Image (cartoon, rainbow, N blue to C red):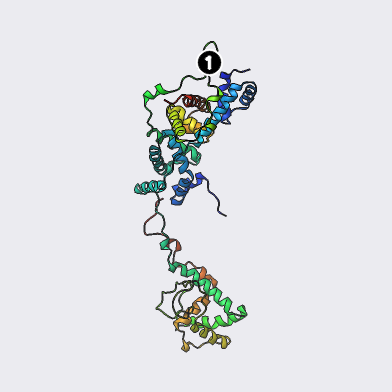
Amino acid sequence: MKTCGEISEALSAFVDGEATREEIEAVEGHLLYCGACRAREREMQKARALLAGLEAAVPDDFRDRVFERLEAQDLLPKRRSLAVLSLRWLALPAAAAAAVAFFVWSAKDGSLRFTRLTAPFVQVARGPATAAPAAGKPRGTEAATPSVWSSDGAGLPGSGAGESRGPSEAGRQVLAQYAGRGGGAVTPAAGLSAEEREIVALLEVFENPQVFEEPSEVDELEIFADGQKERG
Amino acid sequence: MKVERTDEELLLLFKEGSRDAFEELFARHHRRVINFCFRMTGDQARAEEAAQEIFLRIARAAFTYQPTAKFTTWLYQIARRTTLNFLRDDEDGFDKIFLPVGEENDDGTMAVPLPGPATLEPERMAWSAQVRDRLLAALQAIPESYRSPLLLCAAEGLSYEEAAAVLGVTVQTVKSRVFRARRMLLAQLKEEPG
């Protein structure tokens, strides 16, 4: 049977949960009959708890002080500013989503009516007298024209205060004009207004979905660059 | 569902330029770091200073980090080395250190009898500033080479194996030093305050 001195180091490991199987057996056997070592084990456990409970105060500004020093020594990457997330970038998918929603909403029999609607638009748009803006081009690249999306002629889809926007009166008239004709061709001499060309451009997305999938001139990732090259 | 990244993944992300990764590492470990520094130095101001320096060193040394090492092992290695610069121990402090409690004379009798069970009853001691100060003072009386393994294992919760990796010694060395540090600590705590 081991003495108290012989068991003491194993007892310390036992308290830490690090004793080997043989040590555990030896310690547990010794503790059965040695009150002094049982007391010593309790003391070690309590001292361990005291140490674990010994904590520093963490000042409220500790994080700020650390990060101030880190930045002063240029040890942190610059944070990308959310300010560069401009409306212009938001308008691109918002306009496309709005176009989809509009044409699904406005067509009772979406597929057939849509075909009748798109054909003359596309036919006219592809004529030499007109130049439809490329699909996906952010709005605002043309001279200011009444928007087909808002009756007040201002704003972009989704740029309002959350209110639902439908086609403007001008837009409804254009659509009604071609719907009434039942898909008949429009003579090139009639021409298209800027507004009508805009509708055509949006419709071209459905006529030729690949147009929308083609690489945009706008590299969204570039927008997040804040003018400085990031570290790392 | 957000997947929580490991510390090692976060550090690698930081190496690649992610500030958010460093923010997350800081959030996870700043309390642990400042507590370790406090236990090692015994002084709040030194602990804050040391902890700041540790995070600076982590940021500087991140590019050397290899994912083969556990992040906390690496963290504690930096923390220990940094706090060594802030310690107020001096070489003369050995005079203050423990009585050879528990060692046996040649005839098998104890050189100094181990104190009985009534002498240390932490439950009866209010966790007052006095107790805290006594504990800090007792820790400071222990040489750093024994204090570090004791704190890493008993306070920081590292295994002997992890502590051995931090300290660059064997597991048996950790085991032995923890044991001796514990004896020193208990002896210090049981001394009547001067």
Q: x, y (%) of residue B76? A: 46, 37
Q: Quadrant of the C terminus of chain B?
A: top left
The vertical placement of A98 against B27, above or below, is below
Residue A159, image x and y in percent?
A: 46, 71
Residue A8 appears at what percent x and percent y? 56, 22
Q: Between A4 and A122, which is closer to the camera in this rendering?
A: A4
Residue A43 to residue B35: above or below: above
User: Of the residues shown, which amino acid type is indicated by label 1?
Assistant: Met
Residue found at the far left of this picture: A72
- Above or below, comparing residue A184 to residue B47 in the picture: below
* Residue in view at x 42 percent, y 80 percent: A145
Which of the pair B2/B139 is nearer the observer?
B139
Q: Nearer the viewer, residue B140 or A199?
A: B140
Q: Which residue is mark 1?
A: B110
Chain of the residue that carries numbered disc 1 in the rendered image: B
Q: Position of residue A28 (x, y in %)?
A: 64, 25
Residue that lies at the very extreme toward the top in this rendered image: B107
